[in-house]
Amino acid sequence: MLSSFLPAFIPVVLMTQSGGGSGGFMGLLLPLLLIGLVFYFFIYKPQKDREKEHDEMVANLEQGDKIVTIGGVHGTIQRIDEDSILAQVDSKGTRLRVDKQAIANLKNETEEETS
């Protein structure tokens, strides 16, 4: 019974035996800094990179590009305006005006051939 309690007790004893008040402050600050670094490198930075890629993709849109919206609508760009595009969504000529930020990605010709 004592052997299972002892390993959990050792870190507590070592932390309480650190000398001075500044060691306690650093003991609190270090985990917060580590959490901040993990948050930055695993959450914030990848999200910023995805936003940058999306903004570049939207800036490079051209007439005739095949797109997929965030709602799953597939279409071909007919006209590009400042904040929106006009996309043809079927062979009968149905067109939808879509906000540029609502474009999820471009659909490549190689993806169409495989499906």
Image (cartoon, rainbow, N blue to C red):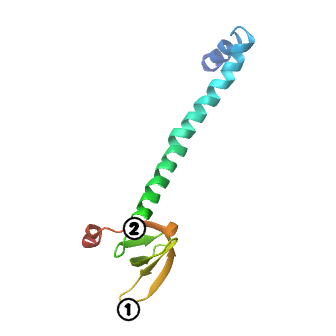
* Quadrant location, the N terminus: top right
User: For residue 92, which numbered disc appears in the image?
Assistant: 1
Q: Nearer the viewer, mark 1 or mark 2?
A: 2
* Quadrant location, the C terminus: bottom left
User: For residue 68, which numbered disc appears in the image?
Assistant: none
Direction from residue 16 to residue 100 in the image, left or right: left
Q: Disc 1 on helix, strand or loop?
A: loop
Amino acid at circle 2:
Leu
Q: Residue furthest front?
A: 82
Q: Residue furthest bottom?
A: 92
User: For residue 61, which numbered disc appears in the image?
Assistant: 2
Q: Disc 2 on helix, strand or loop?
A: loop
Q: Measuring 41% from the left and 82% from the top, which residue is drawn there?
A: 89
Q: Position of residue 15 (x, y in %)?
A: 67, 15
Q: Measuring 68% from the left and 13% from the top, which residue is drawn there?
A: 13
Nearest to the observer: residue 56 or residue 44: 56
Direction from residue 49 to residue 16 in the image, left or right: right
Dot 2 alpha-carbon crowd within 10 angstroms: few under 14, some 14 to 19, many 20 or more: some
27 above or below 76?
above
Q: Position of residue 104 (x, y in %)?
A: 45, 66
The residues bearing labels 1 and 2 have C-alpha atoms spaced at a distance of 23 Å
Nearest to the observer: residue 50 or residue 83: 83
Mark 1 in CB contact with mark 2 (< 8 angstroms): no
Amino acid at circle 1:
Lys
68 above or below 78?
above
Q: Position of residue 48 (x, y in %)?
A: 51, 49
Q: Position of residue 32 (x, y in %)?
A: 64, 30
Q: Measuring 58% from the left and 30% from the top, which residue is drawn there?
A: 34
Q: Measuring 55% from the left and 45% from the top, which residue is drawn there?
A: 44
